[in-house]
Image: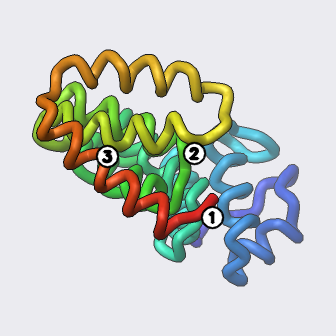
Amino acid sequence: MGFAQSAGMDAGLLTKASGGDLAAQVSLGERFAAGVDVPQDLKQAADWYRKAAERGNTAAEVHLADLYRDGRGVARDRAQAVDWYRKAAEQGDAGAQGTLAMLYVMGQGVAQSDAEAYYWLDLAAAVKSPRQDQYAANRQNVGTRITVEELQAVQDRVAKWKAAHPR
C-alpha cells in the first residue's frame, strides 16, 4: 500500500488485510476512516474498502458507496455511489436498499424513479432492522406517486427477488 506502519497500528491486522482477508480489509478501512490507531486518511480507507468491495463484501461496498456519495477520500461521484450501493442492495443489505431507494427518489446518480424507489424500499422494509419502520413509511409515501400498473410490476419484481434470495 505504500504507507509506513503507524506506531499504534495492529501489525497482525495489516498482515491479514495485505494477505486478502476481507474482514481485516474492512476493519483497516474503518480505522483509517475514523482515525483509530492511525492518522485519519480517507483515501487509505477508500483503498482498503475497494479491495474488499471488489470481492463482494457488502460492508465494504456500503462504506465505499458512502465515500463516493459524500466525496470523502475520493472525488464525489454519485453514479459510482449508486453502483456500489446497488451491489450491496442486490446481496440483501437493507441499509443499502434504503439508501439506493432515496437516491432514486431524489434522482441523485440515477434517473429519478418513484417505482424503482418503491422496489428497493419494499425489499428494505421486509428485513428486521432498526430502520424497518422508516423504510415502510417511506415506501408508503412513494407508493402514492406510482400507478397501479407500476405497483403491480414492482410487486412482481419483489416476489421474484425474494424467491431468488431467501432470507
Q: Residues within 10 Å of mark 1 (few under 14, many from 20)?
A: few
Q: Earlier in the sequence, mark 2 or mark 3?
A: 2
Q: Quadrant of residue 51?
A: bottom right
User: Separation of disc 3 and disc 1 at Cα?
Assistant: 49 Å
Task: Quarter of the image for the N terminus: give it.
Answer: bottom right
The amino acid sitting under disc 1 is: Phe
Task: Quarter of the image for the C terminus: give it.
Answer: bottom right
Q: Secondary structure beneath disc 2?
A: loop
Locate residue 13, reporting x and y percent.
82, 66
Q: Which residue is mark 3?
A: 155
The nearer-to-camera label among 2 and 3 is 3
Q: Residue at x 78, y 55 (%)?
A: 6
Q: Earlier in the sequence, mark 3 or mark 1?
A: 1
User: Separation of disc 2 and disc 3 at Cα?
Assistant: 43 Å
Q: Which residue is mark 2?
A: 41
Q: Quadrant of residue 12?
A: bottom right
Q: Could you tell me how many numbered marks the image carries?
A: 3
Locate residue 122, reporting x and y percent.
42, 38
Q: Quadrant of residue 37?
A: top right
Q: Which residue is mark 1?
A: 3
Q: Secondary structure beneath disc 3?
A: helix
Q: Residue at x 45, y 53 (%)?
A: 89
Q: Residue at x 86, y 50 (%)?
A: 8
Q: Residue at x 39, y 20 (%)?
A: 138
Locate residue 87, reporting x and y percent.
41, 61
Q: Are marks 1 and 2 in contact (CB under 8 Å)?
A: yes
Q: Residues within 10 Å of mark 3 (few under 14, many from 20)?
A: some
Locate residue 156, reporting x and y percent.
29, 53
Q: Is residue 20 left or right of residue 142?
A: right
The amino acid sitting under disc 3 is: Gln
Residue 139, above or below 159: above
